[in-house]
Amino acid sequence: MALTTVYVDGFNLYHGAKELVGRETPGASWKWLDIHALSVRLAPRDQIHQVRYFTARVASPDHDPSLQQRQQAYIRALETDPTTSIHYGQFKLRKVRMPLVRRPNAMQQRLMRAAGQSVKRHPDGNTTVQVWKTEEKGSDVNLASYLIADAFRGKF
């Protein structure tokens, strides 16, 4: 039986599962994935001795203030497994201007402005709006670094 360490990029796992499910459903069970149990099912001949989970603490945008609480609850659940360790990168949330796929008509622009959205029409024909841009930084580098360090130390 081979000793196996599982390395998980938390954001890729979350977004991949969300895409697979097709939509975000309140209380969806896939959000409470037991990574250790899944690993045992995927590698039944191996002994899963460690799960390394790489993520970043999310920032809560105005439209979803409970986002941090939900993520923290999941991380606390993961930490109940003594074989699981959590490794953090950084999460950046900032407002940026992005182009719309289709230019809104005059009525849509009035509605957007009435809702407080800053709509700008540029000379090149693009119409941009201000959006929240989220970026997760460092988790992939941490994952690669632990993978190399663990290999060097013969931990798997």
Image (spheres, helix red, strand yellow):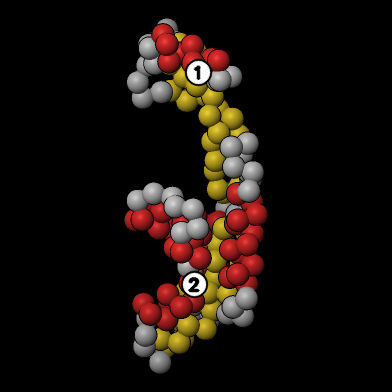
**Which of the 4 image quarters holds residue 99?**
top left
Q: Position of residue 54 (x, y in %)?
A: 55, 62
The residue shown at (48%, 72%) is 35
Q: Residue tagged by mark 2?
A: 34
Q: Residue tagged by mark 1?
A: 112
Q: Nearer the viewer, residue 130 or 110?
A: 110
Q: Amino acid at mark 1?
A: Met
Q: Position of residue 46 (x, y in %)?
A: 40, 86
Find out whether the residues at labels 2 and 1 contact each other: C-beta distance under 8 Å: no
Q: Nearer the viewer, residue 140 or 120?
A: 120
Relative vertical location of residue 88 with respect to residue 85 in this rendering, above or below: above
N-terminal-most mark, 2 or 1? 2
**Disc 2/disc 1 C-alpha distance (Å):** 42 Å
Is any atom of residue 144 visible in this view? no
Q: Nearer the viewer, residue 27 or 3?
A: 27
Q: Amino acid at mark 2?
A: Asp
The residue shown at (63%, 36%) is 62
Tag 1's secondary structure?
helix
**Which of the 4 image quarters holds residue 133?**
top right
Please state which of the two labelled residues, at mark 2 or mark 1, is closer to the viewer.
1
Relative vertical location of residue 71 with respect to residue 91 in this rendering, above or below: below
Quarter the N terminus occupies? bottom left
Disc 1 packing (10 Å; few <14; some 14–19; many ≥20): some
